[in-house]
Amino acid sequence: MKAPWRSTESAVPAGGRAKAPVQAPRILFPFIAPALSRRALDAALRLARAEGAVLIPAFLAPVPRWLPLDCPLPRQAGAAVATQEAIEQRAAQFGVTVDARLERGRTPRHALMRAIECERYDRIVIAAAAPGARGFHPDDVAWLLAHAPGEIVVVRPDQEDDLVELDDEPPAETRGPTVAVPVAFS
Amino acid sequence: MNDAPRRGHHKVFLGMAAGVGKTYRMLQEGKAELEAGRDVVIGYLEPHGRAETTAQAAGLEIVPRREVVYRDTVLAEMDLEGILRRAPELCLIDELAHTNAPGVEHAKRYEDVEAVLDAGIDVFSTVNVQHLESLSDEIADLTGTRVRETLPDRVLADASEVMLLDITPEALRERLRNGKVYPAERIETALANFFTPENLTALREVSLRQVAEGIEARRNPRGAVAEPPPDEARSGSERVLDSAVPWAIGERLLALVTPKPASQRIVRRAWRSAQRLGAELDVLWVAGDDPDPEQSEQLAALRKLCSVLGAHLLIEYGDDVAAVAQRVARERGTTYVLIGTPGPRSMWQRTRPTLPDRLLRVLPGVDLRIVADRSRREEDTR
């Protein structure tokens, strides 16, 4: 009989060898504050839930050239904190674990480059800007497709797609992004 | 010689929620100014169909709204140019947090108000506390409702005068029941959802605290605290924090973290509190040993977060978290400690005092806040 104080995590199987911990897949979700698409986020969360993956929402903060790259960014920090909280709130509704990141760069693309260099991930979900919608510039998406290893899902969000509305609605099980184009790289 | 007009006087009527009487009081005071012989106009009024409010506006000149066509819809927005042309002594402008339709001069109404003030015109305006940027998240947590329209805290911090319209939650619910806030068909839903006694009590507390903190900041003779938090980059550009300059009267926060993703929430919460208090933030990990690869990864993420926020990440080695926290808190003059929700305890651990208990004992006079684990709350509500 197992001792009652022994936690399940520490229990050693009958074979005598503890199992190596299985790492959950990681989905990187880079975004720029004013261009955060709720539907792209929901797409990433649905994917993460289906795969039992950890979502890594990476807030990309452009740093003006006249400031050091590693300086505090209090103005953007406010936006980052609010957005990351909103994402965690949404993720909790989906039952998805979040491991948030914040990456600085001279431009959104530079920050994106630093994020993919630093982070472990299995897949990237990114929102591409359509006219009037929120997301990355098509040039940045093209750059990502050409340079980032791993699988990339590009979502083109619809217009009127605002994360701050998300508390009013339950997780959208059926509503998907307007277009989802999975692109696989080996 | 400087010919620029003096900046107008800005008085904000702040409320905890719709229906407390902000617009009514603004109009009342505007009429009193009119009677005193000043040139007063209404720049924008949103009476929401409330008869008492409409009646109170009678006798005040209204600058006609301008029509803006957006996606085949005609929207009536405040006419900034019209107000500047009319150039009254005092302009009454409702709903400070409003987002303008695309195509007008500014994205937000508070920016219009800035322009009016810059023209030397005094302004009375109204806003609810839930629209303040730094509070919107906390209020979303408290009430379950997130507002879409926000305004930077500096707008309130820069105001010449802030008047809080305070009524009790029950009095507001009574006004709601009597149809003084919303039309009949919305009353029951409003009472059952947003206007619950719990929500209103929480909002009232937040409003009172906001005004109290504003008063405290203005009272500081050094003027350091009265400055808006450094995120208020009026020039639109970032500013580098000078950590050697204390902004606080004496508050200093210490967030205890471990290298785990959940710690980021503790840091974010602590930073928000630090911003509100105008205080410095230290983030402490008490390490038992050198970090393993996974911890190193999390530490790198925490380091970046702290660096962007302007917080100080400290790593101290030790086996006793409370003892190390006590030493660090003494060295750095901590007045406020934030920790995460303690995890499940083993049978053996249950025989010892919890970390919050120990911290309370070793840090007398220091406030302790436990940051909730959101995922647990979601589990409970599912």
Image (spheres, coloured by chain):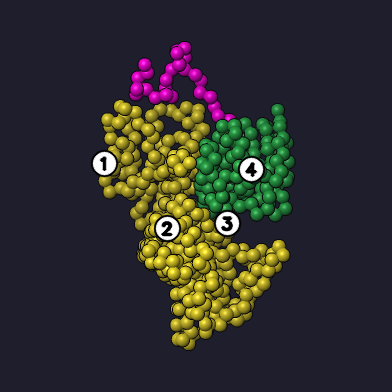
Chain colours: A green, B yellow
**Numbered label attached to residue B361:** 1
Position in image of residue B323 (x %, y %): 30, 36
In front of the other: A58 or B345? B345
Residues tagged 2 and 3 counted as in contact (Cβ below 8 A): no
Image point 45% across, 82% down: which residue? B32
Q: Which dot marks residue A65?
A: none
Report the side of B106 relative to B329 (left or right): right
Q: Which residue is mark 2?
A: B196
How many marks the image carries: the answer is: 4
Image spot of residue A26 (x, y percent): 58, 33
Instruction: Give the crowd class for mark 1: few <14, some 14-19, many >=20 residues within 10 Å.
Output: few
Q: Which residue is mark 3?
A: B237
Q: Which numbered marker is on residue A174?
A: 4
Q: Nearer the viewer, residue B353 or B332?
A: B353
Q: In the rendered image, is residue B83 in sight?
A: yes
The chain under label 2 reads B
